[in-house]
Image (cartoon, rainbow, N blue to C red):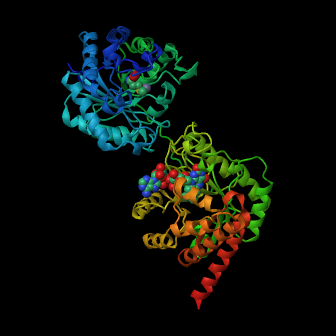
Amino acid sequence: MNFLKRLENEILIADGAMGTLLYSYGKDSCIEQLNLSHPEQILDIHKAYLDAGAQIIQTNTYAANYLKLSRYSLEESVKEINSKAVQLAKQAVQSNAYVVGSMGGNRGINPQSLSIEEIKRSFREQLYCLLLEGVDGILLETYYDLEELETVLAIARKETDVPIIAQVSMQEVGLLQDHTTVSEALTRLESLGADVVGLNCRFGPHHMLRALEQVAIPAKAFLSAYPNAGLPAYTDGVFHYDGDPDYFRKSAQSFREQGVRLLGGCCGTTPEHIRAFALELKHAEPVSKKKLTIKEERIVISLPVIEREFPPLQNIVKERPSVIVELDPPKKLDTDKYFKGVEALKEKGIDAITMADNSLASPRVSNSALGYLVKQQTGVRPLIHLTCRDRNIIGLQSHLMGLHTLGLNDLLAITGDPARVGDFPGASSVYDVSSFELIQMIKQFNEGLSFSGKDLGQKTSFSVAAAFNPNVRQLDKAVQRLEKKISYGADYFITQPVYSEDKIISIYEETKHLDTPIYIGLMPLTSSKNAEFLHHEVPGIKIADSIRHSMAVYNDDPIKAAQEGIKITKSLIDTAAELFNGIYLITPFLRYEMTAELSEYAKHTSERLRRKHRV
Ligand SMILES: Cc1cc2nc3c(=O)[nH]c(=O)nc-3n(C[C@H](O)[C@H](O)[C@H](O)COP(=O)(O)OP(=O)(O)OC[C@H]3O[C@@H](n4cnc5c(N)ncnc54)[C@H](O)[C@@H]3O)c2cc1C
Ligand SMILES: [Zn+2]
């Protein structure tokens, strides 16, 4: 009898974790490779689970796919590892127990980093290996990304008639990463042909039960749950779970009441947890009816929106010429000169001071601390750059909440120069998200929702700029990137510094179909050496030969060289102001007198042009 037939009238107990059990045995290399190197150990674990009362055990193949094995250069061993895993599990079972082939999800918090095509290829290969060895079912587990699970489930359903268990892992209680509710996800999995649908990993019994309270008993499929043994602790460099098996025993009846018919364990569980489930549910009748707890709809629409002090820059620059100036927080602690710069620029009537987030990956005074002081003390609008390099998604969201609290509502969302270009090349670059997702995250905050869809209780009022690098060989490709950023929610763009009139004209030609405003970046050169360094060594900056030649003329005279730098920038402003309302001036080395002079020039030029065009 296959196990689906039995689930019609019985609750079945599945086994618990393989991975964390092997990890706690001290094996932190490739867990699945142990099928080949330590088969006895795997066999012992299977036997221990069966002895504890498990009726369905999983093969030790959770990550035995091409994509994950290649991290250990074991991609050539997919067949060997999977075949051996099934053989070991089958060797352990006697009659009345079943072997399901475990196949884990690959996509993490950043689904786009792994294409569906790669996933399909890798999945098919592992699936055939497991089916060929004659598993009694397939266990699709730990899928955070619903698109991935739906894709692989459809493939599996087409390829085999053996029972399929399809399990998602929640991001928040009741919600998946893409904000689909668990209830909807399980319905979709059922309609794609999964025989058992449910939850595994990430949460322990408490949160899993809270989520299941909102899930109706599926019409055709059976419901499953494989909770973790609580949250892991981290001591002496290792993760370990201290979940108490007796606590599992106490939760078993609740799982039954929620309609669960296949109950097992995930990370941190041991044969003792499974024994507790098995003893508690021995001869227990499955339930077919339950009362649903309907969670109140989040009424995010009515969340308060906090008023902005300054209208968003995208509105300003659509209406009239606008000059913003980058004045980067210093690399040393003294901020006197910085504030002198802010005052000098304020006098020129600029619309914002933009403040880098550790540009070129070198530490600077925190731009949010300094930005807040700039706003409080001078009334100038700070525009805060925000990179994906220095903060993980926890830090980024906390930072966004802090910026909102400080009333710093103007942001530039960028990937950020990688750590290896900066003062601490060995530092890690986080990049949990790309600039696209950062833009999306900020826009979600404006809807009152965290990155994972949690209610924030207020809507933020961020305006989000994004970076546009036109200094590339194929400008059309950069424009495609810009269009993609618009689709993620970018409100306007700020370019890398441009050093040629032709480039400004091509930017105009390639982007004139767009509504989203662009600030053209211009940075005065300070010397010939500065020009050569920027041209040859700084990513994203290219300087026209003619400009480098003009700077070279004043090689030995710093004052004349800076004047030449200003002259060149003024001539670029003449072109930019004809075509764009937005001018973004970058202050080199805190030399604010240069950008103050240029701000004045840019404003006069724009006004002159406006008068001319009005006539
Ligand atoms: C206005 C502005 C302000 C900046 N401020 C800071 C700052 O405060 N701190 C800091 O560390 N850095 C800053 N940078 C630098 C920026 O983070 C780096 O240039 C980064 O490599 C690109 O950032 P992005 O957000 O434009 O990248 P994205 O567009 O998100 O690009 C990310 C990755 O894709 C690559 N890429 C970009 N365009 C293309 C293309 N056309 N084709 C193929 N690949 C491409 C990039 O090289 C990069 O590796 C700033 C840049 C600009 C333009
Ligand atoms: Zn797990």
Q: Pinpoint residue 317: horizontal percent, then vertical percent.
A: 59, 71
Residue 506, above or below 131: below
Which quarter of the image is occupied by the N terminus?
top left
**Snapshot quadrant of residue 259:** top left
Question: Residue 61 or 92: which is nearer the viewer?
Answer: 61
- In the image as oriented, which residue stretches furthest toward the bottom? 615
Q: Pinpoint residue 531: horizontal percent, then vertical percent.
A: 59, 61
Question: Residue 535 or 406: which is nearer the viewer?
Answer: 535
Residue 447 visible: no
**Snapshot quadrant of residue 253:** top left
Residue 367 visible: yes
Q: Pinpoint residue 419: horizontal percent, then vertical percent.
A: 56, 42
Q: Is residue 526 left or right of residue 294?
A: right
Question: Residue 364 or 162: which is nearer the viewer?
Answer: 364
Residue at image coords 44%, 11%: 272
Residue 359, above or below 203: below
